[in-house]
Amino acid sequence: MKDLKGITGIDEYFSGKNARRFNELEDKARMFNAVYGVNGTLRDNIFSAMEYYARKNFIPFEIVRCPLEGNDVRGLTFVKDGVIFLFVNTLIPLNEQIYVAAQGLYELLEYAENLDAPGGWKACWLEKKTFPENNDMVEETQSSSFAGLLLMPTQAVWNTLAVYDMIDKRLTRKDMLLFMDVFGMPYKECVKRLYECGVITYNAAVDLNWMEDKDVEELVSLTGKAKRWLLNGTGMETLGSLLENFKSNVENRYFSAKKAETEKANIQSMIDTYHLNVVLG
């Protein structure tokens, strides 16, 4: 099978046990959306929804958003000292940050469900790969599938097609920008979801998917559509609850004066190293 740049293995994925797993992921995404989604979507409040879910279920959880050179590094989930962390690279486009967060949500849900399972839970790189080539539903693939189902629900896809009179239309690359704009999803993930929903054929998905990131950016720049989602996260950096906890510890005098100065210097060093747009009081 030729390389489909993100859709490789898609036919095999929808067969046997993987099809059953896909349905399970769709049910999980639908249930989370129903409880925590705003107007049927988590596009605009996914970070807040994750924090609230963790707090409601008594799961120590931190979101760290800061710049990291090299766009191949999108995000990472890991556990340290009993706290699950989601790291998001703010140098990637905003729609990819939202997608990474949705992948991280899958890992958070898995963590919550497998706290007492043998072998526990492992760290996960949140990579750009959409489907494996060996028909193996690896962790990263499941998180990617869940992210698409969460951010671009099947019913919402068909509603969008109906609203814009596109149900019987042969969709073009330019049309993909509409779905990017509506759902805040990266271009290729939109193509994948439209194929999964039965909106486009396999061959159409291959054709639409044959776009490099620079080509998508050029099309967005030309049309002005979905432009907001290609901006990066400059100014949206966060170190989780670190600054808030530091301030609370100082105000409540849990630190000695010397300890407070040392910790402040350490945090300031992190801010300077990552060029974070945050102020340490």
Image: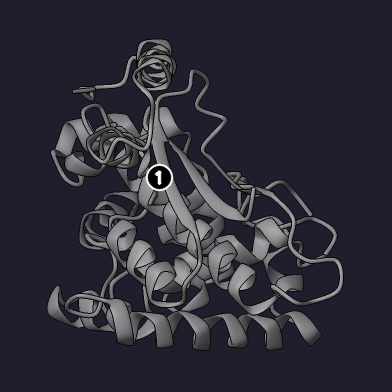
Q: Position of residue 132 (x, y in %)?
A: 75, 56
Screen quadrant of the N terminus: bottom right
Observer-nearest of 194 and 124:
124
Q: Which residue is mark 1?
A: 96
Residue at point 70%, 50% (across, down): 123
Q: Position of residue 272 (x, y in %)?
A: 36, 11
Q: Secondary structure at mark 1?
A: helix
Observer-nearest of 115 and 38:
115
Screen quadrant of the C terminus: top left
Residue at point 64%, 48% (across, down): 81
Left or right, 133 with reference to 271: right
Observer-nearest of 126 and 200:
126
Q: Position of residue 142 (x, y in %)?
A: 64, 66
Left or right, 56 with reference to 108: left
Q: Is residue 76 above or below residue 280?
A: below
Observer-nearest of 189 and 242:
242
